[in-house]
Amino acid sequence: MVPTIGARTNVRRRNSSGSWCVRITAIALLLLAATHAARPQAATPLPGIESVAGSWQLMFMGFADAQYDRQDGVRGSTQIGSINWGMLTATHKLAGGELELRTMLSLDAIGVGSRGYPELLQSGETYGGAPLHDRQHPHDAFMELGAKFRREVSPGTGFSFYAAPVGEPALGPVAFMMRPSAIDNPIAPIGHHWQDATHVAFGVLSVGAFTGAWKLEGSWFNGRDPDENRWNLDPIRLDSWSGRLTYEASPHWSLAASYGYLNSPFSYAPTVSEHRATLSASHGVQYGPDGQWSTALIWGVNSEHGASMSSSMLAESELSLDARNSFVARAEYVQKSADDLALDAAPFAFPPARTFGVYAVSLGYVRELAQWNRATLGVGVLGTLNAVPGALGSAYGSTTPAGVVVFVRLRPGRAKGGDMQGMVMDSGVASSALLRP
């Protein structure tokens, strides 16, 4: 079903502002309370491969799978494809500080095609000039090409600069594929475009200041979603802005809040701009030689000019029992309009502004089949149960449409309990570092 192009210009999301004040306050209190929770034993680094080339420290991490994706119901479909990405950082001492060169690449456009992979209730970006719905878009071949400079002016206090023709501004939580709580989850959250979708922006300049456990960042960036050509660099412009405050409560807890203005993010509705706010909390604990548990709580809200807010909430977790057995889980609630889900045209013809609360709950298991010194090969399955209001039952063939993904996955291995080197989160992006126990 192809929606009416430009219908989004008339979308008005109808929600009580009072109820949002209550929700925002409740979530803020939850995140603050998290800082006083019992301290676990150790932080959880991301799986990565470290090396040294002369005076440069190198770090690689990535993910590649072959997957069978089946989404049931009227709007579902089946696909055999591959999700993949790779990231390389090179770090070097410079001018009393540290220079980090970053690149992140993906062959999604080959692995899942120009329309991406089937995922019920997903929305965001376009195909054939029309908004995608019930599919996750492929990522661009160039997801990041950037450089970051960080320097202390006194112990624990300093500044940073980041510049990228394509990169990630200081808006939202860590992108889903880089979160330890979702590193083995093969599908994107359905709230992606309410939370962390700006992780691929064509044109980013950021400045930051840090002291102790606090970091404040500001960014100027391109607010437009990537276009449908996944192989080039989109036109670079700096027409949007954002700010993010991060508090590293301990090596195990990280809290962040961000706000941003996105100028004309939608190519099919160029006169519409958007405001976005996010809150997030991430937690990690490592136990024994091979076990670890990572969890994230995320709230994101969008507001188009002249419209009320629509929100998303996410809780996700990955539990690795040992070197070979891991469980992943995610639960989401998102408010999506008829326009978001392409339900504003015949035969449904809901008003574009009408908002529906939709849910998705996923549970998966991964078993490592073969492990080498620097890589691991696993097989996994992820099942998802979605829930939509009764008004959408005919559109989806059920009020509880389901999906399943079976996959074989290759990625770097995790650091051992006694070897804490690996990728850690640095205010929204991954950074190569040595964790302290």
Image (cartoon, rainbow, N blue to C red):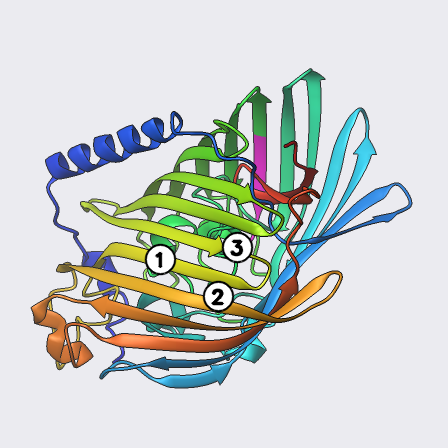
Q: Amino acid at mark 3?
A: Val
Sooner in the amino-acid sequence: mark 3 or mark 1: 3
Query: Percent position (x, y) of residue 60?
Result: 71, 55
Residue at figure coordinates x 56%, y 37% from the top left:
42
Task: Name, please, the residue furthest toward the front.
Answer: 288
* Mark 1: secondary structure: strand
Task: Name, please, the residue furthest toward the top.
Answer: 154
- Of residues 239 and 390, which is closer to you in this image? 390
Disc marking residue 330: 1
Q: Is residue 223 above or below residue 247?
A: below
Q: CA distance from mark 1 to mark 2?
A: 29 Å
* Mark 3: secondary structure: loop
Q: Amino acid at mark 1?
A: Arg
Give the quadrant of the C terminus.
top right
Stretch of the chain drawn in magenta:
200-207
The residue pinned by badge 3 equals: 200
Query: Percent position (x, y) of residue 224?
Result: 44, 55
Give the quadrant of the N terminus.
bottom left
Q: Amino acid at mark 2?
A: Asp
- Of residues 324 and 256, which is closer to you in this image? 324
Q: Is residue 128 visible?
A: no
